[in-house]
Amino acid sequence: FPEFVSPSALASMLKDCAVAEDEAFATDDKHTPHQLPLDPNFLPPNSVRNLQMRTRVASIAYDELPKESELVELYRHPTLLALVSAITGSEQIYLSEDSLGACSVNVFRPSYAHSFHFDESEFSTTIMIREANVEGS
């Protein structure tokens, strides 16, 4: 949706993320699509269930974002909750109170990628606040 957030709010989000970006926690690991340990007894080793994929990403945790930031305000806004509720068909949804993952920002540096996986939550909402450049970062 064009201008889902106002240009000034977007600029503020980008500024807050830029301030925290260098200190973002980085991981470089392999996982299965279900994020479960390998289990050669469950299915053959070449089964998709046992497929190992690399994820290399940095993350700005919720507790590292300014509490008055536009991004946190959007996350906590009742209208966004109502929108997600309408899309999912859920009568009542709740915000996560996870101090790290409630509203986190993925930081993709050159050569970073987040491989396919099933999330542990029933659903999640993702917004992209900055387009990738030609180099893929």
Image (cartoon, helix red, strand yellow):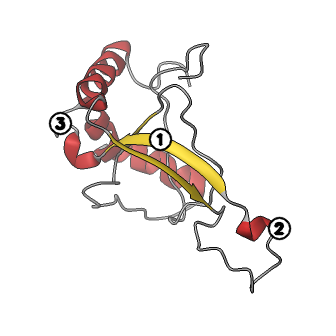
Amino acid type of the residue tagged 2 in the rendering: Asn
| SS type, badge 3 | loop
Residue at image location 50% in from the left, 53% down from the top:
124
Choose top left, top right, bottom left or bottom right for residue 98. bottom left
Q: CA distance from mark 3 to mark 2?
A: 45 Å
Q: Marks 3 and 1, how far apart in space?
A: 21 Å
Tag nearer the camera, 3 or 1: 1
Q: Is residue 75 above or below residue 18?
A: below
Q: Which residue is mark 1?
A: 57
Between the residue at mark 2 and the residue at mark 1, the CA separation in whole angstroms equals: 26 Å
| Residue 100 disc label | none
Considering the numbered disc 1 on the image, is that residue within a helix, a strand or a loop? strand
The reply to whether dot 2 and dot 1 touch (C-beta < 8 Å) is no
> 40 or 64: nearer the eye?
40
Q: Looking at the picture, which amino acid does disc 3 mark? A: Pro
For label 2, the residue is: 46
Please give the residue where the numbered disc 3 appears in the rendered image.
Answer: 66
Rendered location of residue 127, percent (x, y): 49, 35
100 w.r.t. 110: above or below = below
Residue 39 in the image: state x and y as whole percent: 68, 80
Q: Give the crowd class for mark 3: few <14, some 14-19, many >=20 residues within 10 Å.
A: some
